[in-house]
Image: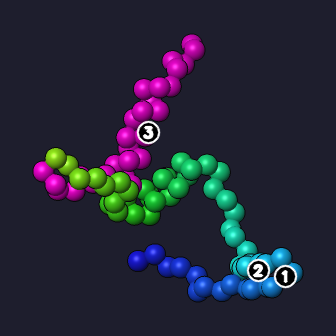
Amino acid sequence: MLALLAPEVRVRHTATGVVLSSPITPGDPARCIGDWLVRWARERPAATFLAERDPDGSWARMSYGEALEAVEACSIVARPPIAR
């Protein structure tokens, strides 16, 4: 199960409304969205990344590991030839 931080919200009332804030400083942002796929493919390669119903009503699933393999295969095909 994914470990989450305990909820902690600060509430400040102002003349125009309410301001909600958190005392928790966020960590460093990911360089790009693809970094998340790489991370989860390493940490939980068999976990479901995408799922949809197939024509029979069963779930067709793709794991993080399978998704990363597919992305890497596309990048190899799309890469221009190396100049020699």
Does the magenta segment cover residue 67? yes
Name which residue lies at 41% across and 77% down.
Answer: 1
Front residue of 33 and 75: 33
On screen, residue 33 above or below 16: above
- Could you tell me which quadrant the C terminus lies in? top right
On screen, residue 48 above or below 22: above
The residue to which callout 1 is attached is 14
On the image, the x and y values in percent for residue 59 come to: 22, 56
Q: Residues within 10 Å of mark 1 (few under 14, many from 20)?
A: few
Residues shaded magenta: 56-84
- Look at the numbered disc 1 and give the secondary structure of its residue: strand
Tag 1: residue type? Answer: Thr
Q: Does the CB distance between marks 2 and 1 fall below 8 Å?
A: yes
Name which residue lies at 20% across and 49% down.
Answer: 54
Tag 2: residue type? Answer: Val
On the image, the x and y values in percent for residue 17 come to: 79, 78
Among the two numbered marks 3 and 1 on one chain, the one whose residue lies closer to the N terminus: 1
Q: Alpha-carbon distance for marks 2 and 1?
A: 6 Å
Q: Does the CB distance between marks 2 and 3 fall below 8 Å?
A: no
Q: Residues within 10 Å of mark 3 (few under 14, many from 20)?
A: few
The residue to which callout 2 is attached is 18
On screen, residue 14 above or below 67: below
Mark 3 vs mark 1, foreground winner is 1
- Look at the numbered disc 3 and give the secondary structure of its residue: helix
